[in-house]
Amino acid sequence: MIASVIASQTDLERTDLERGAAVEARLDRIPASPYLWKVIALLSLGGFFEFYELFMTAFISPGLIRTGIFHVGSNGLFHLPDQAAFASVTFLGLFLGTITLGGIADRWGRRAAFRGFAFCYAAATTVMAMQSTAIAIDAVRLICAIAIGAQLITLDTYASEIVPRNIRGRAFALSFAIIQTAVPVLALLGWLVVPHAPLHIQGWRWIAVIGGAGSFAVWILCRSLPESPRWLARNGLLEDAERVTSVFERHAETNLSHALLAPKSSTLKCVGKASFEEILRPPYRRRTIMLTVFHFFQAIAFYGFGNWLPALVNAQNRNVPRSAQVSFLITLAFPIGPLLWSTIAEKCERKWQIVGAAVGTAVFGLLFATHTAPLGLVVLGVLITLMNSLLGYSSHVYQAELFPTRMRARAVGFVYSWGRLSTAFTSLIIGLFFQRFGTPGVFALIAFAMLVVVIAVGAFGPRTRGLTLEQISD
């Protein structure tokens, strides 16, 4: 009797595993469809306002300085420019959000986490727009950044699980084109709005309110997003997983005007509950260490250039109005970069895209520090931005590929958090380098960081091109 009950339970578990494996196999053979691109576009719209929040530092700081809220030089908090303190608080919050809240998407689901974090940072940014002291602004910014940090992980995890393997790189590249449009939008608003006070409201406050309102709109629009079928299957919600997968299949078949091919058989694996310690044990320990080192150093280049762009341009070209125009022209490359790189997204191994981007960032950055003419600054600034775009999109898809569904958000949150922690401190270090050594000192630091990235990913990063998420994570 007992033996028959155990056998029956084993058969049931096996059936559930087969159904879960079938869901994953069905997802990976679904081609792109207007419905899939709609889902990616909604996720990207959420990412747009995340980047808006992240890069806000560079473009509202001149307005905060002009109104006397922020101070330059050693007159600010910690005897450093208040812009540096603001950036450091931002990345401290990102670190706390990624390392402490990353597991929420694994427990509650990708959709619920995505919308919940969007609401939190929308509210915090709106409150920040009402503050009038550097300390109050930094305090609210910390809360906002915690939510943004957790949201960034959720976006990568969510997108990687619903996109078929043969277009995963291209989908992330096109998504980043939408997301990074936030930077030129910010630059344009910083140029046209920050120096003025529309309706007698300081320009920097308008920038913050626009970000908060946009994030609230995303929270409303994303009600229609489906849950990740992979997450549903891995959490025993098999009927829901099959239902959502069927929706993707139905839209793809409508677009193709014929039935989809039968899915390939998938390897059956019994998977238990994930624990945090698992990411520190083989076979994931090597990947965890590699990505931790990568994020710690790549963030120095990516955010060091983006958050200090107007200041770096102005240091090279003392014409303030012209510097604002130069900064805006450089930021136009942010959305163009992912569109350009989408053409090679599935043709080149992901790790070598990261290595190439790191080398390019280092070389073009050192050249930028030697130029003062506006044309040279624009050309080199655009090249640095293109390299950063390649580094950004390829690393986001790469890190999400390297861990299994059951712990993807938690693992990505852990490795990603070290980049946020490094930037919290390096924002202060960049401010110090900028004060003492100028633009050449900043780009020397960035070049060193990129050298470490090349060694870490080039020597220890696994290959992922053309493989399913399940094949990569095994």
Image (cartoon, rainbow, N blue to C red):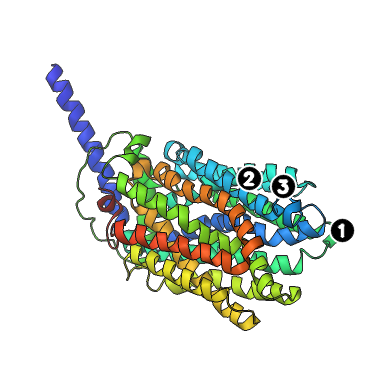
The answer to whether 272 is drawn above or below residue 425 in the figure is above
Q: Nearer the viewer, residue 373 or 47?
A: 373
Is residue 298 something that shows in the picture?
Answer: yes
Residue type of the residue flagged with mark 3: Leu
Q: Nearer the viewer, mark 2 or mark 1?
A: 2
Q: Position of residue 114 (x, y in %)?
A: 52, 46
Residue in front for this viewpoint, 73 or 20: 73
Q: N-terminal of the two: label 3 or label 1?
A: 3
Kindly identify which residue carries mark 3. Answer: 77
Picture coordinates of residue 203, whole percent (x, y): 78, 60
Judge whether 323 appears above or below 80 on screen: below
Q: Is residue 411 left or right of residue 99?
A: left
SS for callout 3: helix
Position of 26 with respect to 323 (left or right) is: left
Q: Which residue is mark 1?
A: 200
Please report contact status of discs 2 and 1: CB closer than 8 Å, yes or no: no
The front one of 22 and 64 is 64
Residue 144: numbered disc = 2
In this rendering, is residue 291 above or below 11? below
Which residue is nearer to you in this view: 458 or 239?
Answer: 458
**Which residue sits at x=29%, y=39%?**
281
Q: Secondary structure at mark 1?
A: helix
Where residue 289 sits: x, y (%)?
36, 48
Give the mark nearer the N terminus: 2 vs 1: 2
Which amino acid lies under the numbered mark 1 shown in the image of this protein?
His
Specify whether residue 161 is in view.
no
Task: Kindly identify which numbered label has been placed on residue 157.
Answer: none
Question: Gap in Å between the C-alphas at discs 2 and 1?
Answer: 26 Å
Q: Earlier in the sequence, mark 3 or mark 2?
A: 3
